[in-house]
Amino acid sequence: MKHWRLAGPLALLFAGPLQAAEPALSPANTAWILTSTALVLLMTLPGLALFYGGLVRSKNVLSILMQCFSIAGISSLLWLIAGYSLAFGEGNAFIGDLSKAMLAGVDRDSLSGSIPESLFMVFQMTFAIITPALIVGAFAERMKFSAMLLFSALWLMLVYVPVAHWVWGGGWLAQMGLYDFAGGTVVHITAGVAALVAALVLGPRRGFQTSAMMPHNMTMTVTGAGMLWVGWFGFNGGSALAADGNAAMALLVTHISAAAGALTWSAIEWNRFGKPSALGAVTGMVAGLGTITPASGFVGPGGALIIGLLAGGICFSATLYLKRVLKIDDSLDVFPVHGVGGILGTLLAGVFASTQLGLFSGYGFAEGIDSMGGQLWVQFIGVISTVAFTALVTWGLLKLVDALVGLRCSDEDEVQGLDIALHEERGYDIL
């Protein structure tokens, strides 16, 4: 496109009506996304690391912290080298191209909308960091460190990057009109489904169902949960990519859903077991946060309240069903919280985006979609395609990694604890 430029007073006289304004950097938007980027990184380091670290037994706490830190490092480098370009480059409907590999053509003056493209890239990088880190909770206390590194790197490039392109990079789901504001499909469904597949492939921990495997430090877990709650404001609010009313509403509905999820889970525990637990409260909070994520830019406070209440109840039931009925050892409940929550939130985005629900109304359906049924159909296709693609590729990657380096630690290492067995360190010195 040719840009016409006028000099001096003529520029002021003719600017605006006769020419399209060139993209300009917005200091306010840039400041908000800078802040949001820091908040989303805080969710992984130290938020998720502490949340997960407190939930495992003391002999494995450092292994969890090490896995989260290592995934942050390897995901960052892969995102720079090719991940960002393949996710957000033009490419085709299924994958981007390599035109921005190593940020080729991106300098300090390059813009993505009204913010620097380098900032957009690193904001998206923080999502690419936390998604494979979430999967760690499924195979906690039993996967080799080398296998975890190789699997996480391959999974990021072969699962996360393509799905991110489908939904956020102009791919086929975006073209259909899928509503996923901040990662219901891209983050939570992919991580949750991968977690379930990993738990099935690895099998349960030694002693699962026969011995207590209680969290060793709930103080650490609650601290990490608090960081996740605060960091999620950047996760969802930052996904507006502007300091505006859309960001403010996304932040508000995120908070409402988190509060409703925490209280609902606690109430169910209190009624069923006689006492509410700190573990239940923080797990319900995460369920509320994960479930509102895809809908956060499209629903109002009333819709967020219902979403949070449903998240607390449905994710609670899914957690018990997976462990007690199916007897699947998803160690830290990644699938029932993130996977089920992501599916639920993605579908409910198609309901509460409607403008016809009174106090529970949202902000309308995607362009070209004029009914709740039409939006729900697109949401359903997004869920099914993401689940199927993630499950198939994750299973293949786990089998490949098992053939190359072996997935699981030895029985001796698992009994001793991965901190000593794999890292020759202890999380605590016992006097």
Image: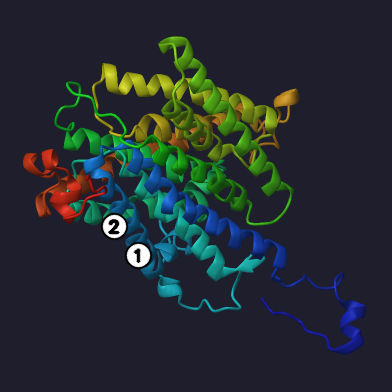
Q: Secondary structure at mark 1?
A: helix
Report x, y in % for residue 205: 18, 33
Report x, y in % for residue 333: 34, 32
Numbered badge on residue 78: 1
Query: Do the residues under discs 2 and 1 have CB atoms within 8 angstroms?
Result: yes
Taking the image as shown, residue 151 lies to the left or right of residue 78, namely left
Q: Dot 2: few (<14), some (14–19), or many (≥20) neighbours within 10 Å?
A: some
Q: Dot 1: few (<14), some (14–19), or many (≥20) neighbours within 10 Å?
A: some
Q: Secondary structure at mark 2?
A: helix
Measured in 3D between alpha carbons, the distance from the residue under mark 2 to the one under mark 1, in whole angstroms, is 8 Å
Query: Of the residues shown, which amino acid type is indicated by label 1?
Result: Leu
Q: Which residue is mark 2?
A: 153
Q: At 71% across and 71% down in the image, what residue appears?
A: 24
Q: Is residue 377 visible?
A: yes
The quadrant in which residue 204 appears is top left
Query: Where's the C terminus, which quadrant?
Result: top left
Q: At 21% across and 42% down in the image, what residue appears?
A: 59
Pick whichever, 84 or 233, lies toward us: 233
Query: Where's the N terminus, which quadrant?
Result: bottom right
Query: Of the residues shown, which amino acid type is indicated by label 2?
Result: Ala
Sequence-earlier tag: 2 or 1: 1
Report x, y in % for residue 5: 78, 84
**Relative to 192, does residue 234 appear above or below in the rendering?**
below
Taking the image as shown, residue 375 lies to the left or right of residue 96, namely right
